Amino acid sequence: MTKRSVLFLVLAALLAAALIVAGCAEKEKTAEEKTEIVFGAARSYTGPLAIQDQSCFGPVYRLWIDEVNAAGGIYVEEYGKKLPIRLLKYDDTSDMNTMTNLLTKLIVEDQVDFILAPISTAFLKAAAQICNEHNFLLIGAEGGAKELEPLMKELPYFFSLLNYATHQVPPLAEMLAEHNIKTAAIIYIEDQHGLEYKNDLVPALEDAGIEVVFDKAIPMGVKDVSSIIEEAKSKNVQALLCCAYPDENFAVMNQCIASDYNPDVLLFGPGACFEVFYQIYGENSEGVMGWGAWNEKSSDKMKDLAERLIAHQGERNMDWWGMAIYYAGLEALQQAIERAGTLDHEQIRDILATEKFDTVIGELWFENGGVPAECYPGHVGQWQNGIFEVVAPKDKQTNKPIIPKPKWKPVTQEE
């Protein structure tokens, strides 16, 4: 070998070594520079949807972030360390266009690492489409609907979390039939939520041998539903099912009491599952049903979660439909990040889509972008002695349903 060849080999070896050292230095530099995981949120902190951030997913993600940071952060193998979470949030003012613009800003301009879901099914659908355009993960929170089901194949980065009519209506119809309910009436709000539940309830009840005496739409924000209540009362309808939002549900509840209409079954959508429902109605909450459900009796893990949420908020501001499920979704995301060892969304997405996770509600997994019915802690709840008991399905019951519900207690003038 000539001196020239030897010199060439020495120089090549030195160059290779220099590149390796530079690469390691760059990797070390990158690891040192990455000091946090930024979660972005375009959520409704003001406007009509703000109540849900105050009472539903909001307390959950705030608790989770504080707990993760207290433990040092999420371990990411790519950086060889735990990274704490920082929340970058914007107020969408309960406006859809504002939400979509802010969500794009978070991804494109702010370059956050992950996104927290916005509030409501409609907002969630719009956000899922934006996140998928950017190959950005989005795990649902306050929102879920049948119309999302056929879109899942086209939205591989979206994972729907909350249970909804598909999961909840069948066990309700089965329970009502078993307790000899023969007639029902449905009040539903004139939007996607109300229509979806009504359209699932009518055939499910009829298939269970329950006559749907009427189904009537009400506008959002309605104050007077007395004529509908009187019709249900005059026809001696056994089950009144109200598929609406808290404001309308409270209006129906108030007028049922005022009219002394006490059906054997009274069920409401969002609102009945909130602790504030019991705080407002006290003994008259007894026997009232709502979608959900879970409680401190569901498992030791869920009891512990409830205690932590109450302590973190400084009050018993609980949502007995979604809170445990929302926390489980964040646990699944954290476990997927740790298993992937990276913040790369494609790798994390593949783990979320194919693996199972140990969560506060038990083993959780996704099928076609949604959570199977058997993963949920309950689908129908009922207030009994101040506890929102799980009454359906049977295998998740924390207590048996009370049908017929107790009669109304007299309401004093002060109340």
Image: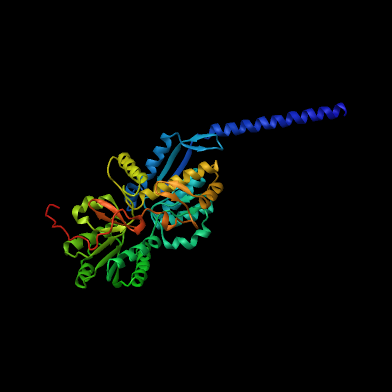
Return the x and y of residue 153 as percentages of the image width and height.
52, 59
Q: Please determine whether, in this image, residue 337 is positioned above or below residue 21.
A: below
Q: Please determine whether, in this image, residue 151 is positioned above or below residue 302.
A: below
Which quarter of the figure has residue 395?
bottom left
| Horizontal relation, residue 342 to residue 379: left or right | right
Q: Is residue 69 visible?
A: yes
In the image as oriented, which residue stretches furthest toward the left? 413
| Horizontal relation, residue 111 to residue 205: left or right | right
Q: Residue at x 34, y 65 (%)?
A: 174
Q: Residue at x 54, y 33 (%)?
A: 33
Q: Please determine whether, in this image, residue 121 is positioned above or below residue 36.
A: below
Return the x and y of residue 282 as percentages of the image width and height.
20, 52
Return the x and y of residue 135 as percentages of the image width and height.
54, 51
Viewer-proximal residue, 218 or 210? 210
Q: How is the image coloured?
A: rainbow
Return the x and y of residue 10 as percentages of the image width and height.
78, 28
